[in-house]
Amino acid sequence: MKPHVLSLVLLGASALAGCNDPGFRGVPEVRIASAAEVAQCRPVSVITNEPGVYGPLVGHEAERYARNKILESAKDAGADTVVFDPVTPGEPVYLLRAQAYDC
């Protein structure tokens, strides 16, 4: 196989792998709720994640990816609901923290 064709095949394969990554596609089996909505639910675990990239151009996407990875971890732990700790709007997010619940 020619080098440029192999590069295209590898690029396509990595793009498809990204489509299956819950960090990109989300986790529809786990909902995000407020603290008031989980009063009758069983706490499962506290989950944290660092976005890893900051700044106005990619920071929001990195934060969204990190939130989705928390949802994936919650699902893996047996939770169906997550309550994220509040963040200050407009400020960089260096750490996301959430409580996972089984409702």
Image: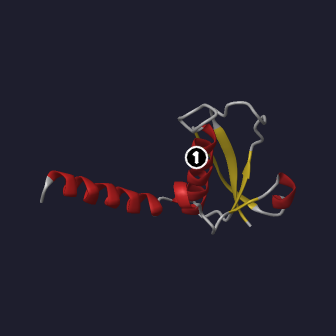
Question: Can you name the residue that lies furthest to the right here?
Answer: 36
Q: Residue at x 44, y 57 (%)?
A: 18
Residue at the disc numbered 1: 66
Q: Is residue 23 above or below residue 29?
A: above
Q: Residue at x 53, y 54 (%)?
A: 23
The part of the image, by quadrant, that contains residue 72 is bottom right
Q: Is residue 49 above or below residue 5?
A: above
Q: x, y (%) of residue 47?
A: 62, 47
Query: Element under label 1?
Result: helix
The part of the image, by quadrant, that contains residue 78 is bottom right
Question: Can you name the residue that lies furthest to the left here?
Answer: 1
Nearest the viewer among 25 and 103 is 25
Q: x, y (%) of residue 10?
A: 27, 56
Q: x, y (%) of residue 13?
A: 32, 60
The part of the image, by quadrant, that contains residue 101 is bottom right
- Give the total number of marks visible in the rendering: 1
Nearest the viewer among 66 and 34 is 66
Q: x, y (%) of residue 6?
A: 20, 56
Q: Please identify the quadrant where the N terminus is shown.
A: bottom left
Crowding at dot 1, Cα within 10 Å, few <14 / some 14-19 / many 20+, comes out as: many
Q: Is residue 37 above or below residue 49?
A: below
**Left or right: 19 as drawn, with respect to 95:** left
Q: Residue at x 59, y 63 (%)?
A: 27
Nearest the viewer among 29 and 88 is 88
Q: Is residue 28 above or below residue 69?
A: below
Q: How is the image coloured?
A: secondary structure
Q: Please identify the quadrant where the C terminus is shown.
A: bottom right
The amino acid marked with disc number 1 is Ala
Nearest the viewer among 12 and 46 is 12
**Left or right: 34 as drawn, with respect to 18:** right
Q: Residue at x 67, y 42 (%)?
A: 97
